[in-house]
Structure formats: structure tokens, C-alpha cells
Image (spheres, rainbow, N blue to C red):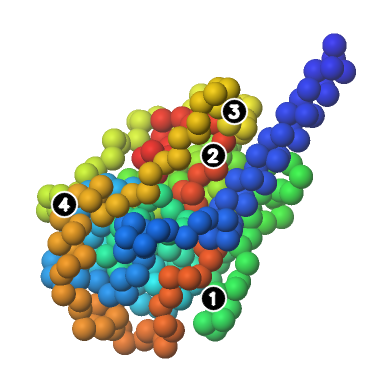
Amino acid sequence: MALHTTRTFQTFLKLAFAGMLGASLVAGDAGAEEKPPSPGSAKAIFGSVSLPSQGVAQPYGFYAKGCMSGAVALPTDGPTWQVMRISRNRRWGNPAMISLLERLSRDAARYDGWPGLLVGDISQPRGGPMFNGHASHQIGLDADIWLTPMPAHPLSIEERETLPFTTMLQKNAFLTINPSVWTESRARLLMRAASYPQVERIFVNPAIKKKMCDTWTGDRTNLGKLRPIYGHDSHFHIRIKCPPGTTACKPQAPVPADDGCGKSLAWWFTKEPWAPPKPPKPGTKPVKPREVMVSDLPNACSAVLAAPSVDSIQAATFGGAADAPAVAPTAAVPAAASDEGLPVIGPVPDDKPSIE
Ligand SMILES: [Zn+2]
């Protein structure tokens, strides 16, 4: 019996590991796997817009179903940050998001032993759904930050395109942090990000959440903002609340008041989240999800698409920094830091895909 149990568990671990591989495949190379969007779909239309609309910054709709006007760009370089994968043209956000990223980069450098941020995707110039990589990031209030510290020298444009991700997970182990990669400075960075009142949630891999639960000895008030999710083992995802004064932004239900280190975290260490999808019942045709069209988004998003553009990227760069390097934005770069492209594997708990 004991042997049988052990074997079963080993099989489970193998399966789980296969599930993880699947997850990281989805997380790492979604662009290579995903079909290009049909012409006329919201992904195709929003993905082909290269400049934001003029006017007041407004998020319209929800993190995973919406768009934005009046976006500003995070400068590609600052004293304590560098933008990665510049060609993706996804460094656009609500000014509240961009200023928070700059603030976090400064605070982490000053207080947390984290030299600076490598910033991944924020949003497209007018938000909206992306053809690869994310379900959310649509209204300028989500941003991905690498769990790799900014190097001391400015990375070349080429390096920013190709620098590989470093996973925090141990190879050949189930949801286990690699102690030779993980550092306390990463823990401090995450808790710094969670400390700002405008930060709504932070998505991390379940193994990272567990590590934080097991080892964080400081104030745990904001630990509950760290939400476990698939992927997110080489970067984390910051989501901020609808900024004050925005009227068309749909808020997300607040995180539960506890630290999130109990039952909901334990669930991730069971088979369920890693189980393969149930095969369809014999005789039933698999239902293909319909592509999202602009008409599925809030009405304001058609107006956002039709609105006049700002004059240039520089003109809409936060702080007016004129440092945008000469990279032609392209929509044809494969996803590198995808995340909420959740694997289609089994049921998912409350705090997940639909709302990610
Ligand atoms: Zn993200």
C-alpha cells in the first residue's frame, strides 16, 4: 500500500511537472503557439494602433475587457528602471500606473537592495486585448515586472529583446523555489510593491506565494495582495485600483482580508489545478470560444479607436522624456513575458482567469 501510494504520488508529481511545463510553455512562448487574430477582431485592431489617443486619461471597462484613452508611455530608461521588449510597444499606461512604477523603482533601489526594475508589458497605446500573452493589461492599470534585477549598464535594444527570463522555480521539482536564485531582496521588492494603497493585487507563482508565507517576518498586512496564479515564476504582475475620478473603470472585488496563506494557497499544491482538461462528452462538438470584437468591449472603445492620435511617442512619454530609441513598433514579435495566458488545464479557483 505504502509503495502504491508512493508510486501514485510520483506519478502525480510527474503529471504535475508536466502541467508546469505546459504552464511555462504557455507563459513563455504564447506568441509562437497562438493563432494570429482575424482581421477585424479587437485583438487585430487594437494591436495595430501605434499611438495613444489625445486627451484625458481614462480606463474604460475592466482589466480583461476594455481599453483606454490618453495613455502615457513609461520612458524606456530611467535612473532605476529599463523597459524590456521595446518593440512590442506595450509601455503605455494610465499616468497613475506609470508614476507608481517610477516610484516603486526608486523605493526598491533606496530601501530594498533592488538596483532597479526591468519592466515588461504594461498596455498597448489604446489598451484593448492583445494578440498574445495576456488576458488583462487592457486598461492601462496592469504591469509586468521581471524578477531579474536591472543590470548596472543600460541594456542594448537587442539585449532587451533577447535577454532570457530566469525562473525562480527549481527544475524537476513541483512548485519549489530554487534557493540559489531566490533572494530576500526579491521578497522585499514584492512587499514594497504590495505596500502602496493604490496597488490592488500582485500576481505571483504559487511557489513564490508559499515562500513569502513561510519566510516573510515583517508586517504581513499586505501579504494577502500577493495572489497565486499559473506562470509568473520569472516576473510578477502589479494591478492597481481604478484611479480616483475615473468613472468608466470597473473595479475588481477586493482581495480577502486574510494573508492568503491558508486553504486557497494549499489548493495549488493539490492535483486539481494541474489536471488535464476533461475530454468532451462523446457526440458533443467542442465549443470554440468566439473572438472578441470591438463591439464586445465598452461602447467608449470605438470612440477611443476613432479619436485623433498624439503627435508622437515622445509627446506622450511620461515626464516628456525624449529618449525613445528608434525602434519601429511591430505587432509581430512573439510573446516573451506572457502571463495571464492561462493554460487550459482544468478548473480554476475564484481569483483567476476570468478576472485576470
Ligand atoms: Zn501581467
Residue lying furthest front: 283
Q: In x, y percent, where is residue 125?
A: 30, 68
Q: State the CA–CA distance, disc 4 to disc 3.
A: 37 Å
**Which amino acid does the dot numbered 2 rest on?**
Val
For mark 2, what is the residue? Answer: 344
Q: Earlier in the sequence, mark 2 or mark 3?
A: 3
Q: Earlier in the sequence, mark 4 or mark 3?
A: 3
Secondary structure, mark 4, is loop
For the residue with label 2, is its CB less than 8 Å from the closest atom of ligand 1? no
Which label belongs to residue 160?
1
What residue is rendered at 29% in x and 52% in y? Answer: 293
Q: State the CA–CA distance, disc 1 to disc 2.
A: 29 Å
Q: State the CA–CA distance, disc 3 to disc 1.
A: 41 Å
**Which amino acid does the dot numbered 3 rest on?**
Pro
For mark 4, what is the residue? Answer: 299
Q: Nearer the viewer, residue 279 or 351?
A: 279
Q: State the CA–CA distance, disc 1 to disc 4.
A: 36 Å
What residue is rendered at 71% in x and 48% in y? Answer: 170
**Where, quadrant-wise, is the C terminus in this rendering?**
top left
**Where, quadrant-wise, is the N terminus in this rendering?**
top right
Q: State the CA–CA distance, disc 2 to disc 3.
A: 12 Å
What residue is rendered at 60% in x and 41% in y? Answer: 207
Label 3, residues with CA under 10 Å away: few <14, some 14-19, many ≥20: few
For the residue with label 4, is its CB less than 8 Å from the closest atom of ligand 1? no
Secondary structure, mark 3, is loop
For mark 3, what is the residue? Answer: 279
Q: Label 3 near label 2: C-beta < 8 Å?
A: no
Q: In x, y percent, where is residue 205?
A: 55, 44
Q: Quadrant of residue 192?
A: bottom left
